[in-house]
Structures are given as structure tokens and as C-alpha cells.
């Protein structure tokens, strides 16, 4: 059975603590399926995600059997503090056992590739990988990854696996994003949503408002929502 579940927390800190705990447990559960099981984990950018990663880095996780991917990336140089991969890896810290070859960052703007080739290169790297778990944030406008409402990225996200994004309404204007296909093929999607600026978007997505990209997301298995009280303020009790 496919579950749509929402769990509320008092605030972002409690949400980040709980999701880091739950994530560490889930990674271990999946790894326990076989001695060679490697978990495919897609990371999101965003503020609450960084708090979760910081806590996750301090939890006991067998990082030698985790493969990291990203849902989207800002088209900036590799050392730019705005880069989602840099924020995530800095927040995780020096975790033991995580092999560089298992860290699949999207190309950076100083990679030597242009934006189109960078997206195509990531699509080739991703190939037919299925994420065991895909973490997503939700923007105040209802965007997920770099799929934005009232923007060509929403239509473009209906084909292919990885796409270049231009004229993003949120800076920086150029980005790379997964499309809906690899997100929705994920065995589990976990939305992590914190803050009152997300309240309207969260209500509309939960109501199924198709104008918002978040409403187009539905995992092959469970789609779970981890939200704080401020983000949930427009949801029924
Ligand atoms: O720019 C982005 O923003 C969204 C939401 O971030 P938040 O700080 O408002 O939670 C994030 O999900 C996405 O990965 C990122 O590129």
C-alpha cells in the first residue's frame, strides 16, 4: 500500500533532529537487506536540509554503503557557498567511509561544461538509477528541486531525467534539476518543510493544486511529509 503521511514537529530544530534520526535508522534498515546493499540517497538543497545533514553527520551511519545524488543544483562554481552540494557536504562534515566515487554531485559552472552539457552529463551518470530515498524541500512558491510554478521548467520536467533550468525565479537564474521521472520513480520521497513562509504552498500542495510542482510529486512507494508547526499552520489539525 502507498502511504501519504504527514508528521508535525514544534519547530525546525525538532524536525531536523527527528528526520536525522529517522534517516539514520532507515539507511540501516535498507542496508540490512543484504551485506552488499548500497542505498541510493538523493539530497535536496535548502535551509532545513542543511540542519538535517548537520545532525545526520553525527549519527552512526555506514557511509561506505551509501551513494549520494542531488535533486537540483545552482549553476555556480564548485566552491561557491550557494552550491547545494557544498552546503550538504559541509553540513555533513567528515563522515567516515563515504567514498568520493559514490558522491554524485551535479557539475558546477566552472566544470568546463556549458549548462546543457552539464545536465546531459548528469543524466548519463544517473542512467537508470532508482533512488531508495529522495529528500525534497518545498519552496514558498511551491517549487521542488528546481521545478518552478508558472515557469517553463514545470513543462520541461515532464520528460527526460535531468534538465537545464534558465531564468529561474529564485537566484541564481541558471540551475540543473532532476525532472519528475526520477523523483517519482524513487522508492520513497521525504518532503522536509519548515517555516511559515511555506504554509500556503504546503496547504495548496496537500490540496493537490496542480499549479504547484510539489503536487506533481508522488513516490513509487511512500511519500512522507515532515513539517513543522509554522509550515503546517494552514493545514487542518
Ligand atoms: O533553491 C532551492 O530552494 C529549495 C527550497 O529551499 P528552502 O531554503 O526554502 O527550504 C530547495 O528545495 C532546492 O533544493 C534549492 O535549490
Image (cartoon, grey):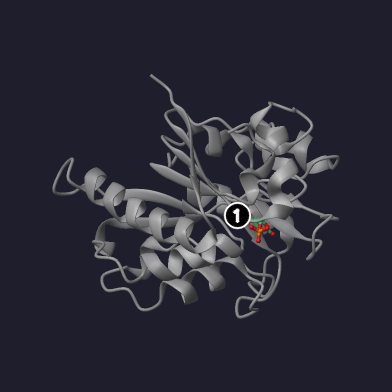
Residue situated in front as seen by the camera: 75 or 210: 210
Q: Secondary structure at mark 1?
A: loop
Residue situated in front as seen by the camera: 81 or 12: 12
Q: Quadrant of the C terminus?
A: top right
Q: From this viewpoint, which residue is outermost toward the top?
A: 1
Residue situated in front as seen by the camera: 40 or 1: 1
Relative to 24, 138 lies left or right: right
Provide residue 46's location: percent of width, then percent of height.
61, 61
Which residue does the image show at 61% across and 76% down from the upper left? 78
Provide residue 59's location: percent of width, then percent of height.
29, 66
| Residue 166: quadrant of the picture | bottom right
Which residue does the image show at 69% across and 36% down from the upper left? 203
In this rendering, is residue 4 above or below 231? above
Relative to 189, 162 lies left or right: right
Pointer 1 residue Cβ closer than 8 Å to ligand 1: yes
Q: From this viewpoint, which residue is outermost toward the front?
A: 237
In this rendering, is residue 220 above or below 126? above
In this rendering, is residue 132 above or below 90? above
Which residue does the image show at 68% across and 34% down from the upper left? 205
Residue situated in front as seen by the camera: 98 or 150: 150
Relative to 57, 209 lies left or right: right
Which residue does the image show at 68% across and 27% down from the upper left? 207
- Mark 1 — residue? 194
Provide residue 148's location: percent of width, then percent of height.
77, 45
Note whether residue 106 is visible: no
Q: Quadrant of the N terminus?
A: top left
Label 1 crowd bin: few (<14), some (14–19), many (20+), radius 10 Å:
many
| Residue 195: quadrant of the picture | bottom right
Amino acid at each position: 500500500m502507498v502511504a501519504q503521511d504527514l508528521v508535525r514537529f514544534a519547530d525546525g530544530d525538532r524536525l531536523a533532529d527527528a528526520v536525522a534520526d529517522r534517516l539514520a535508522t532507515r539507511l540501516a534498515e535498507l542496508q540490512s537487506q543484504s551485506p552488499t546493499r548500497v542505498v541510493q540517497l538523493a539530497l535536496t538543497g535548502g535551509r532545513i536540509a542543511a540542519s538535517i545533514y548537520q545532525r545526520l553527520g553525527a549519527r552512526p551511519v555506514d557511509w561506505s554503503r551509501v551513494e549520494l545524488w542531488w535533486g537540483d543544483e545552482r549553476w555556480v562554481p564548485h566552491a561557491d557557498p550557494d552550491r547545494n552540494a557544498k552546503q550538504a557536504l559541509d553540513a555533513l562534515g567528515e563522515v567516515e567511509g563515504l567514498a568520493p566515487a559514490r558522491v554524485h554531485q551535479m557539475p558546477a559552472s566552472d566544470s568546463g561544461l556549458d549548462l546543457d552539457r552539464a545536465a546531459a552529463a548528469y543524466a548519463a551518470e544517473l542512467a537508470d538509477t532508482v533512488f531508495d530515498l529522495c529528500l525534497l524541500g518545498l519552496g514558498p512558491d511551491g517549487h521542488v528541486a528546481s521545478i518552478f510554478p508558472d515557469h517553463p521548467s514545470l513543462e520541461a520536467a515532464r520528460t527526460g531525467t535531468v534538465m537545464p533550468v534558465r531564468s529561474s525565479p529564485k537566484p541564481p537564474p541558471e540551475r540543473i534539476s532532476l525532472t519528475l521521472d526520477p523523483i517519482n520513480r524513487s522508492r520513497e520521497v521525504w518532503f522536509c518543510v519548515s517555516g511559515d513562509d511555506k504554509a500556503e504552498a504546503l496547504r495548496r500542495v496537500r490540496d493537490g493544486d496542480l499549479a504547484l510542482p510539489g503536487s506533481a510529486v508522488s513516490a513509487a512507494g511512500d511519500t512522507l511529509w515532515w513539517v513543522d508547526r509554522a509550515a503546517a499552520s494552514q493545514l487542518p489539525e
